Amino acid sequence: MTTVSAPPATVRLLLFAIYRELAGGRGELEVAIPPGADVAAALAAARARVPAFSRLPERPAVAVNRVYADLDTPLADGDELALLPPVAGG
């Protein structure tokens, strides 16, 4: 009996402001994650892929499919994960 594992899911990581700069000017990346992974796993995959992402905050503001989300929010294949830069005001 052969066990078939599920293929990895792919999420689209959207990058703005400083995060785009850290990615060499790219506004988005595709990140492969295991099925059932959460936002934290996708960020770990992004950090592994883009060395400059080691400078990301431990808990950056994110949105999944245009809704603010936590790091434990589960992701599905095709989801859009946006890294939201810090906002300064005065």
Image (cartoon, helix red, strand yellow):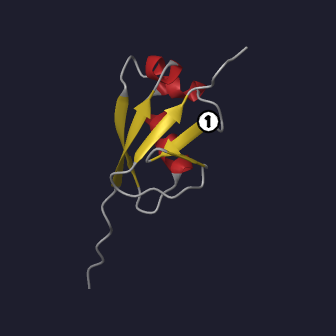
Q: Farthest residue to the top: give it.
A: 90
Query: Residue 71: where, in percent of width, then height?
Result: 60, 49
- Residue sitting at 46 percent across and 16 percent down? 21
Q: From the image, which quarter does the N terminus lie in? A: bottom left
Judged from the image, the secondary structure of the residue bearing numbered disc 1 is loop
Identify whether 1 is placed above or below 11.
below
Residues packed near mark 1 inside 10 Å, few (<14), some (14 to 19) or many (20 plus): some
Query: Residue 16: where, in percent of width, then height?
Result: 46, 25
Quadrant of res 27: top left
Nearer to the camera, 38 or 63: 63
Left or right: 60 as drawn, with respect to 51 = right
Query: Residue 39: where, in percent of width, then height?
Result: 53, 49
- Residue sitting at 51 percent across and 41 percent down? 43
Q: Farthest residue to the right: give it.
A: 90
Q: Name the residue under label 1.
A: 60
Nearer to the camera, 42 or 69: 69
Q: Farthest residue to the front: give it.
A: 90
Name the residue type under label 1.
Answer: Pro
Q: From the image, which quarter does the C terminus lie in? A: top right
- Residue sitting at 35 percent across and 34 percent down? 29
Query: Residue 86: where, in percent of width, then height?
Result: 62, 25
Left or right: 71 as drawn, with respect to 47 = right
Identify whether 80 is placed above or below 50.
below
The number of numbered discs placed on residues in the rendered structure image is: 1
Q: Farthest residue to the bottom: give it.
A: 1
- Residue sitting at 44 percent across and 21 percent down? 20
Left or right: 61 as drawn, with respect to 45 = right
Identify whether 2 is placed above or below 63.
below
Left or right: 46 as drawn, with respect to 2 = right
